[in-house]
Image (cartoon, helix red, strand yellow):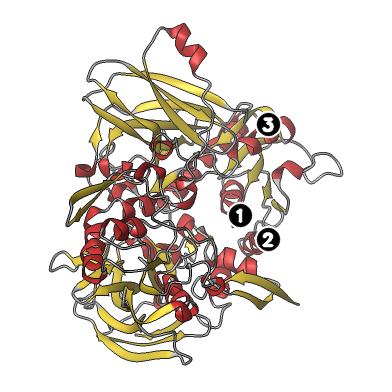
Amino acid sequence: MKTFCGRANPTTGAIEWLEEDENYDYHQEIARSRYADMLHDKDRNTKYYQGIRAAVSRVKERGEKAVVLDIGTGTGLLSMMAAAAGADFCYAVEVFKPMANAAVKIVGKNGFHDRIKVINKHSTEVTVGPDGDMKCRANILVTELFDTELIGEGALPSYEHAHKHLVQEGCEAVPHRATVYGQLVESKRMWSWNKLFPVRVESEDGEKIIVSPPEMENCPGVPSVCDIQLNQVPSSDFTILSDVVTMFSVDFSKPVTSASTCYTVQLEPVKSGKAQIVLSWWDIDMDPSGKINCTMAPYWVKPTSALQWRDHWMQCVYFLPNEEPVVQGEKVCLTACRDEYSLWYKLQKAREEEENKADVRVESPVCRCQAHLLWNRPRFGELNDQNRTDQYIKALIKVLKMDSVCLCISDGSLLPMLAHYLGAKQLFKANNLEDKIKIIEARPESLTSSHLEDKKISVLVGEPFFTTSLLPWHNLYFWYARTAVSSHLTSDVTVLPQAASLHMMIVEFQDLWRIRSPCGICEGFDVQTMDDMISNSLNFRESKEAEPHPLWEYPCKSLSDPQEVLTFDFRKTVPQHCLRTEGSVTLLRKGRSHGAVLWVEYHLVPGISINTGLVQISNEKGNCEWNPHCKQAVYFFSSVIESETLTDLPSVVTYAINFDAKTGEIAMDFKL
């Protein structure tokens, strides 16, 4: 059966109706899932297996039958571990139907169909009794319902319900407990992901400073977690202000409550500074004694342990509502608040205990300035990059005249203010520009002469940046918008940027390849069915697609030189025909060719460009440094997806890249 799906095309801006297979959504979900990453997480899998074996042993030693409830079973891996450890019966609950079907096949293939029952329901809908999904309550509760924030996937309500309805009192739980840790730091880099810094503009009249309005300055932001690979942030980017503190623990073997609550810890700063950020992570003890421990601690906390790379659990950056000065040795109170699904933090000076108790009810932060809803964290970082801003200023100085009539097409951009300060004829209250800059609430194709007060546009500018863009070339929407407003432009209009170019490089990833690599055998269990399922979903589209990743978080080395493959001339309208290129790339370094990375450069004016991808290849080994504010496009080669072992390392990669001007999509094909 086919179904029509409406979607906004991020590159052309058009609403398109596409005929999709009824399984399209599920294929997308599987293809972009992190199942492979979890199955490759050796540390997680080993610790779970040890914890499950120990729990089954404890139940057997009491002379009881071991009945296991596994919530969120996925591939059925943890249930198979329990069955192999001697559990008498396992109920494996999985709400996602395609995944539950796969679990049935995997369980059968491994010979456990008589001891594992897969239940395709949400755990809160599972029934117990002679005619229920489960014949009796379980005495061992096994789950893996955690995300980087621990509770973001609804672990607490699931545990709360399970203890009330599905497991026995005093049951064993794997994991047994989770503990959340926090550490206070000062970091200009991370704070720049949350607040707009003053922007300096050097013009003929001297230096002007664009400041954010008070409502933006004092806004607490949004409560959504900023989860990153903290192990890729160098220690020079932050100053530690406190020791690591335990914020709270959850014992999963006892009844759990999901009701909102706060936890306050008194701490003594080890250094004076501006407290801006709480860095946070968690660990899980698989057994009551805490001997089997799986931790997300970053490199400066446990530098001795070999860090296990994983992408499904990272570390958290929480922004305090405001910058708070702290003094070494002067106690402060750090409060972690949570609801069912999220956490947020508040810092207060240590006062009398009673006063504190009255003050800990902290409301979930709500963005009042709209900026945190419009700009994500990398976008804040980009707008705060003064070097980047200076490139736009240099370019605008070259193109603006006293009588320039300027139209800016970009989302939430500061370019109109830069243009105004640099002398264009024609936002924010704090900068008293309401009468100088007109905000037009219309789509480019709906623009009329009256919107423009019957003036013709002499300078068309864009960063370009659009909130709907996921892949680097989605910002080519600027080109389509430029084409739509052609009739409103002067014959000698200046377009900035004047062009864009698509660049490509072949790389070997240190770890990122694992998210797409088949697992085959995991802890002795055959999970090939899952590999096949991911592979089928990746091949569901006629051509495989590139996917966006912030590569500053994922180390890789270049195997080839970067190469320009396509150019887009914004001085002209979008062509009617496709842009196509074919060629080959010579591999200069030995290594596994995991994939191609693609990015876009914007040529503002001759000699001034903005690069969204490779900053530099930093040494002879080929280690790469990437623009930290943008996601790059990664196209994984089939050798990663099919885990081919290439006996001869290729010396050349051939490519064919096609830009479809009608749809704005880029299709690509590579051959090793």
- Left or right: residue 106 versus residue 42 is right
Which residue position is annotated with label 1? 76
Mark 3 vs mark 1: which is more N-terminal? 1
Mark 3 vs mark 2: which is more N-terminal? 2
> Which residue is more in the foreground, 242 or 430?
430
| Crowding at mark 3 (Cα within 10 Å: few <14, some 14-19, many 20+) | many
Q: Quadrant of the C terminus?
A: bottom left
Which residue position is annotated with label 2? 104
**Tag 3, which secondary structure?**
helix
Where residue 377 appears, as percent x and y from the top left, is 40, 50
- Left or right: residue 393 versus residue 95 is left
Which residue position is annotated with label 3? 163
Q: Amino acid at mark 2?
A: Val
Mark 1 vs mark 2: which is more N-terminal? 1
- Left or right: residue 389 versus residue 318 is left
Spatial separation of the CA atoms under disc 3 and disc 1: 21 Å
| Crowding at mark 2 (Cα within 10 Å: few <14, some 14-19, many 20+) | many
Residue that appears at 67% across and 57% down: 96
Camera sees residue 244: yes
> Which residue is more in the foreground, 25 or 345?
345
Spatial separation of the CA atoms under disc 3 and disc 2: 26 Å
